[in-house]
């Protein structure tokens, strides 16, 4: 079977900045990949290219056999790919429940009852069914991020992208979000995670990727990448963050 | 629930953030005072005040009609203007920017005069040149032309208000909506605009009140609003002080009322959270 994500040789420029310099990567179905790297290395940009929140200048990305080329295909891919953001990006004018049901109703065309059932099941899964009627501003950061995960899962995505999901959280809330992500990984979700949570990477990831200056420098199983990196740049970076 | 019960306890300090649950806006008294003044004048000196009121009465309906219809159109045109200003297409962006600059750069009074006096002549000239009968006999409807002129001018300001409101919503909201598979229109409709409308409510309310006052300009293009009825009355009866005092009080009643309604809407959307 073909890999569910096939990225080949993509380049991305922001004005004069060459943010991605020929990145190629294949992710198998059910695989969990963690991307690490210094800020500005292009890891978030790469992630955002997968659901085309960011346009790339050359190269190609095929997600679940759908090439990201036309507007129609981009929307098709977006319904199959869930995304979780560093800043949560919950809809502040809607209750938790409405946050999780909105896209189900208007994109998946589910009725109110079905959408609510799906939402409640997912809110239970992320551990906060009692907050269904609350508004995002009444929740802690960790709770908000778990709602954001439930909101993405409600679309039944085949792939989940996480863009630094715990970086905006207070330390004591990081684990509750990582636990939800660990569970997802165990259930066989395909996940691409930009994060420096080494513990999560060791526990859940099949592969860890080190990126620097718009390129993939090294790919290895997390234990090996973190303990015995082969590239100097990787060693230097890890010596700073570990 | 249990918290709000305790707020009647006189020993409790005022809890900040709770002031906006007050039931009555004291500025309503100013509105009632102006209404009372009009009533008092009409009762103690029916001649001329009651006569003035009776004379300008049908003008009041016209003023309200022109204002409300224009405002509804402005809300729609302004929204499309804002989407045009934020469009990725250079052509659309350029076109709406030129529109906004022109509509804001020409005095409203001149625009109204243009649409009522110059525009029909243009239509007739085209009719002559192309020999189209309907164009040759074109007669401008004063109210329609007044609404057109007011709408085109005010929609330019509204465009900028909407644009500021939409831009005040963080980029992440649009990205979250799009990443869930929503189209641009769905994301606007369900995510961005509901939040933006809350932000722009105060300036939109201001626009409504300005429009109500500026609607008096349509009196120069043959629309019989209250201002024009006032001029007609002073034409028959030389009582400028009484007439214009009355007209001013009537406008004041309407603007004070509108301001209170806007204030009430603002408080309501704020306490919803």
Image (cartoon, helix red, strand yellow):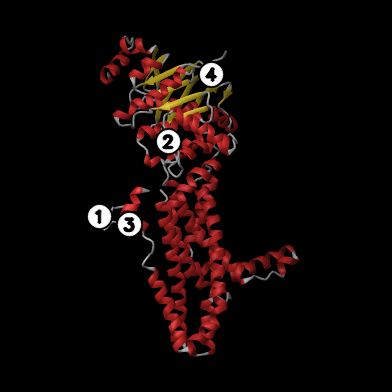
- Residue B88 x/y as whole percent: 51, 42
Foreground mark, 2 or 4?
2
Q: Is residue B132 above or below residue A86?
A: below
- Residue A61 x/y as whole percent: 52, 23
Which of the two residues, B197 or B218, is positioned nearer the viewer here?
B197
Q: Residue at x 45, y 49 (%)?
A: B196
Chain hosting mark 1: B
Residue A4's tag is 4
Residue A208's tag is none
- Residue B81 x/y as whole percent: 52, 52
Q: Is residue B171 above or below residue A216?
A: below
Foreground mark, 3 or 2?
2
Q: Give the residue pinned by disc 2.
A: A130
- Identify the mark nearer the N-term, 3 or 1: 1
- What secondary structure is marked by label 1? loop
Label 1, residues with CA under 10 Å away: few <14, some 14-19, many ≥20: few
Q: Give the residue pinned by disc 3.
A: B19
Chain hosting mark 4: A
Can residue B159 be seen from the camera position used here? Answer: yes
Label 1 and label 4: CA atoms lie apart by 61 Å
Circles 3 and 2 on the same chain: no
Q: Give the residue pinned by disc 1.
A: B13
Foreground mark, 1 or 4?
1
Circles 2 and 4 on the same chain: yes
Label 2 and label 1: CA atoms lie apart by 31 Å
Q: Residue A131's image quarter? A: top left
Q: Residue at x 36, y 67 (%)?
A: B26
Label 3 and label 2: CA atoms lie apart by 29 Å
Tag count in the figure?
4
Label 2, residues with CA under 10 Å away: few <14, some 14-19, many ≥20: few
Q: Residue at x 54, y 22 (%)?
A: A63
- Residue A74 x/y as whole percent: 56, 30
């Amino acid at each position: 079977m073909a890999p569910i994500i096939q990225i080949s040789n993509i380049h991305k420029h922001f004005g004069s900045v060459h943010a991605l310099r020929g990145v190629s990567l294949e992710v198998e179905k059910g695989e969990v990949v963690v991307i690490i790297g210094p800020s500005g290395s292009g890891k978030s940009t790469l992630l955002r290219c997968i659901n085309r929140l960011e346009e790339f200048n050359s190269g190609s990305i095929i997600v679940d056999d759908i090439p990201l080329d036309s507007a129609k295909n981009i929307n098709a891919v977006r319904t199959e790919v869930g995304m979780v953001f560093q800043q949560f990006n919950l809809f502040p004018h809607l209750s938790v429940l409405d946050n999780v049901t909105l896209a189900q109703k208007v994109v998946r065309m589910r009725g109110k009852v079905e959408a609510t059932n799906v939402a409640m099941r997912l809110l239970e899964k992320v551990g906060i069914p009692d907050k269904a009627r609350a508004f995002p501003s009444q929740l802690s950061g960790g709770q908000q991020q778990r709602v954001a995960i439930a909101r993405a899962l409600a679309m039944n995505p085949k792939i989940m992208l996480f863009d630094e999901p715990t970086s905006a959280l207070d330390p004591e809330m990081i684990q509750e979000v990582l636990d939800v992500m660990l569970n997802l990984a165990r259930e066989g979700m395909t996940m691409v995670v930009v994060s420096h949570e080494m513990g999560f990477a060791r526990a859940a990831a099949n592969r860890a990727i080190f990126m620097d200056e718009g390129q993939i420098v090294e790919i290895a199983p997390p234990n090996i990448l973190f303990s015995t990196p082969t590239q100097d740049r990787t060693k230097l970076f890890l010596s700073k963050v570990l | 629930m249990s918290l709000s019960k305790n707020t009647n306890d006189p020993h409790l300090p005022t809890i900040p953030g709770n002031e906006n649950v007050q039931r009555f806006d004291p500025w309503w008294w100013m509105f009632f005072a102006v209404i009372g003044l009009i009533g008092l004048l009409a009762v103690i000196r029916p001649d001329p005040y009651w006569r003035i009121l009776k004379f300008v009465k049908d003008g009041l309906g016209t003023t309200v009609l022109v204002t409300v219809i224009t405002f509804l159109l402005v809300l729609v045109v302004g929204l499309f203007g804002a989407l045009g200003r934020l469009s990725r297409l250079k052509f659309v962006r350029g076109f709406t920017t030129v529109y906004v600059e022109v509509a804001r750069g020409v005095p409203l009074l001149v625009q109204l005069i243009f649409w009522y006096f110059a525009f029909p002549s243009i239509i007739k000239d085209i009719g002559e040149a192309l020999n189209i009968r309907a164009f040759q006999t074109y007669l401008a409807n004063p109210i329609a032309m007044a609404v057109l002129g007011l709408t085109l001018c005010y929609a330019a300001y509204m465009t900028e208000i909407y644009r500021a409101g939409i831009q005040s919503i963080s980029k992440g909201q649009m990205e979250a909506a799009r990443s869930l598979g929503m189209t641009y229109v769905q994301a606007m409709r369900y995510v961005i605009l509901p939040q933006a409308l809350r932000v722009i409510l105060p300036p939109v309310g201001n626009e409504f009140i300005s429009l109500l006052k500026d609607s008096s300009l349509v009196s120069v293009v043959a629309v019989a609003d209250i201002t024009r009825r006032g001029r007609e009355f002073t034409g028959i009866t030389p009582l400028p002080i009484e007439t214009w005092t009355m007209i001013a009080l009537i406008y004041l009643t309407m603007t004070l009322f509108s301001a209170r309604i806007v204030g009430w809407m603002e408080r309501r959307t704020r306490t919803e959270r």
